[in-house]
Image: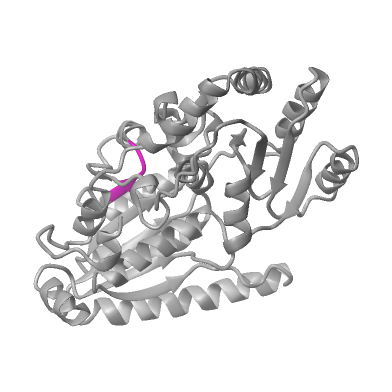
Amino acid sequence: MRRELAKEAAKHHPATIVFVGSYPPPVHGAAVINAVVIRIFQEAGLDLKLVSRNRRDANCSRLQIIVHGAVATARGLLRALKVMASGSKVVLYISLSGGLGQAYELLFVALARASRRRIVVHHQSFAYVTRPSRLTRMLFAVAGRGAIHIVACRQASDLLRYRYDGLVMRTVIVRNSSLPPLMSRVLRGRSVLQTVGFLSNITREKGIEVFLEVVRKLYSRGRSIRAVVAGPCEDDEIKRALEEARDEGLIEYWGAVYAKDKAAFFETVDVLLFPSRYAHETNPVVVVEALASGSPVISSDRGCLTDLTEAEGVIVVRRFDQYVDIATSRIIEWLDNPNGFRAMNQACANVPLSDSLKRLLGSVGMSRRTPASPLVQSA
């Protein structure tokens, strides 16, 4: 089956994809999405050349980091040059960084443009979408109007076209919620609300202090509810705050969770609170995973989350300064009205599945007539 798929697919798509981006480890949103995309390409029979942007030098000195980065960049460029200099068809697929990492990626874009290769830019940050960046504008100019820009929602597409007028002409919407295995629906029926949860890299930007404030406010109103916090934490002050809350009996802190422990988290949590103000937030993986497990989400208004509605299991709080009050009120409402909570649980099944897989494969030149891979068929 795989051999037949590869032979048929080779008639319709480029021979090689140079994939520039990060992928686990470490585990973070963009790396997870990249790993899913890589797996989809591999299952579809595409030939991949990976150029990793992973950092393995967190404990090194600044000089060592600079030297390591320069050496890694040179190696990556040489590898990309070797592939692009070949006679075969080649696509450059860039998982675009949200900040200065774009200077690194610009070199690969320039190489691909000079080699007249197809360029695909996958956007996983909203920072430069909300606030235009000169570096981003330069990268788009070098990529050219023929570059294909993959975005997670209509809002991102519209804003990119508006902010970078004339530079972004071709956009393809690929929702994270449509990519297997992220959206392998295992909806757990939840008859009553018992547990709220927070899962993220635990920082102030991700809103951990807001989560704790919601839990405290619930207790102050006589509503004792189980609260579970999970995720790595490097901030000593936040660690102390978590320990204090745990000692008060307000929360359980599970630490970093992966694989089975992460699955256990979503089995345990009935509602996910996502009070993020992180500038790069686009279409967070944790929100997709929560909805896939049947857990409604109360989210701040960040990135592509603004496109989601209560009909899809998500309450988006438009003003951040109202998050605590609105989240507290909705949780109390669901505690008092189990039928209302069950309706939100069922709404999680309404997150639309689209033809994102076809769009993704089409962006790298793979014909939509190409047979779906086993991974695609399982979506």
Q: Is residue 151 magenta?
A: yes
**Secondary structure, magenta segment, majority class:** strand
Residue 276 left/right relative to 362: right
Of residues 53 and 311, the one nearer the viewer is 311
Visible in this render: residue 352? yes
Q: Which residue is pictured at 67% across the width and 37% down the height? A: 195
Relative depth, front residue between 353 and 267: 267
* 338 is higher (above) or lower (below) than 143: above
Residue 98, horizontal then vertical, whole percent: 50, 49
Quadrant of the rendering where the C terminus is positioned:
bottom left
Report the quarter where the N terminus lies: bottom left
Residue 325 picture location, percent across and down: 67, 17
> Magenta includes 140?
no
Colour pattern of the rendering: one colour
Residue for point 14% across, 71% down: 9
Q: Give the range drawn in magenta.
A: 149-153
